[in-house]
Image (cartoon, rainbow, N blue to C red):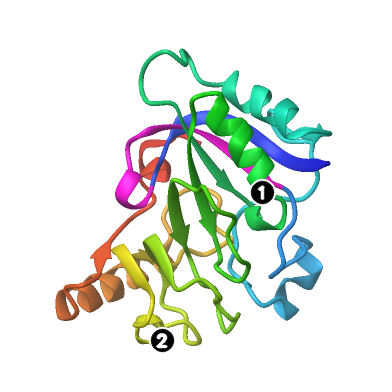
Amino acid sequence: MYKVKEVFYTLQGEGAQAGRPAVFCRFAKCNLWNGREADRANAVCQFCDTDFVGTDGEGGGSFATPEALADHVAAFWPDLQQGAPFVVCTGGEPLLQLDEPLLAALHDRGLTVAVETNGTLPAPAGIDWLCVSPKADAKVVLSTCDELKLVYPQPLAMPERFAHIQARHYFLSPMASHQVIAGDDPFRSSNTRAAIAYCMAHPRWRLTVQMHKLVGIA
């Protein structure tokens, strides 16, 4: 049984795939925070601004088989015969649920599969694009990926800690305040300046911003 918070069609807003049309499949549950605000202060990851609790979001639900979820995801793509159909599996933590049978079912429907993970769990074979985004002092078990994306700054997860991870792309994403729903975020502005300075001093890294929030899409 797969538990999914929401499924929706939009543009990828961050990283190397920014601007690409994508179906987002947001799995419920995370292993670094239970999603309850009352427990945030004691969580491993304390800055998450995403609702991944339950299955009541747009396009969310419970799916008994890989084929049922793959059909549901594929139905959000405008035309599977064109446009390089692309799904981003995210969360929460998608690797708590994403497995090889589901990957195979998504591939059978012509979808390229990207995964956004915190890197604390092994990844099944067959992922087309793997983005690892480590959080705090959680142990990262993945050592290779297509994209390493760090929310910056994190005192326990600064870029130097992940020098051993082999990636095609290295990104810093300025940390925003989870308390800001709309409007200016001075916290993110200062972190953006800090991320820019780090990238300039360490040109292996590139800046990525949350384009989807800047242009007002999901």
Whether residue 174 is visible to the viewer of this picture, yes or no, is no
Quarter residue 137 falls in: bottom right
Q: Position of residue 73 (x, y in %)?
A: 62, 27
Disc 1 secondary structure class: loop
Image spot of residue 134 (x, y percent)? 51, 72
Q: Nearer the viewer, residue 94 or 194?
A: 94
Q: Is label 1 in contact with label 2 (beta carbons under 8 Å)?
A: no
Q: Quadrant of residue 138?
A: bottom right
Q: Which residue is mark 2?
A: 161
Residue 16 lies in magenta, yes or no? yes
**Eyeballing the image, is 102 above or below 32?**
above
Give amino acid for label 2: Arg
Q: What numbered label is drawn on residue 98?
A: 1
Residue 87 shows in the view? yes
Query: Would you place residue 161 above or below residue 134 in this image?
Result: below
Residue positioned 45% across, 73% down in the render: 143
Q: Secondary structure at mark 2?
A: helix
Query: Can residue 63 be found in the magenta stretch?
Result: no
Q: Residues within 10 Å of mark 1 (few under 14, many from 20)?
A: some
Q: Provide the residue span drawn in magenta.
A: 14-27
Q: Nearer the viewer, residue 73 or 15?
A: 73
Kind of residue sitting beneath label 1: Leu
Residue drawn at (43%, 60%) of the image: 185
